[in-house]
Amino acid sequence: MTKKKTKTRQRHFDLRVSEPLFEAAVKRMREKGSRTTSQYIRELIERDTRSAANEDRMAHLEKVVAANHNRVAGQIKGLAVANRATFALLDAAVKAILSYLPDAGPTGSELARSRGKDRYERVLRAAERSSSELIEKLAGTEDRV
């Protein structure tokens, strides 16, 4: 049994171009290694139709990436709000704890107060550092949105 090869019907069209454009096309055809102008034009058309499909896929991917970026940026903003709330709660708790610590006595009260202030300042600086790092990261994402 031999399989019959079915030929696809080939269509043609005439193309009129100016002499300089024709010479440039022939020169480019030879550079590309095409044997005939028909083969060169066929390759150009095939490449163009394939690239149109790729452009559609790229546009879809760009939309997906942009949507994901916006979603992540929104989540990061939510984290920033949560971070500020945590900092406020920590601040209130530390103030309450440090203000109700018993004094060490009349001679040690100033020492205890200064130690409490030092501890409070360290906590504030640590919280401020983490908050400022998050805000810097947020500022970086807002520039890209």
Image (spheres, grey):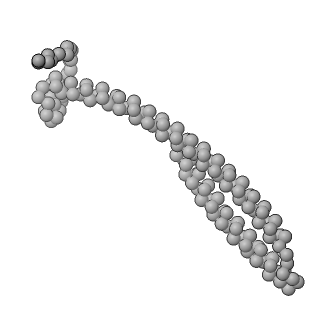
The structure residue drawn at horizontal position 83% and vertical position 70%, both measured from the top left corner, is: 99
Task: Say whether residue 107 is visible.
Answer: yes
Q: Residue furthest right?
A: 106
The structure residue drawn at horizontal position 83% and vertical position 83%, both measured from the top left corner, is: 108
Task: Report whether 41 appears left or right of 92.
Answer: left
> Which of the 4 image quadrants contains residue 15?
top left
Residue 8: give x, y in percent of width and height: 20, 16
User: As rendered, which of 61 and 40 lies closer to the eye?
Assistant: 61
User: As rendered, which of 52 and 68 lies closer to the eye?
Assistant: 68
Q: Residue furthest front?
A: 1
Quarter of the image that includes the C terminus: top right
Residue 114: give x, y in percent of width and height: 78, 77
Task: Say whether residue 10 is visible.
Answer: no
Task: Report whether 43 appears left or right of 80.
Answer: left
Residue 84: give x, y in percent of width and height: 69, 55
> Which of the 4 image quadrants contains residue 86?
bottom right
The structure residue drawn at horizontal position 69% and vertical position 70%, both measured from the top left corner, is: 122
Residue 57: give x, y in percent of width and height: 39, 32
Residue 125 vertical position relative to residue 114 in the rendered view, above or below: above
The structure residue drawn at horizontal position 23% and vertical position 28%, both measured from the top left corner, is: 44
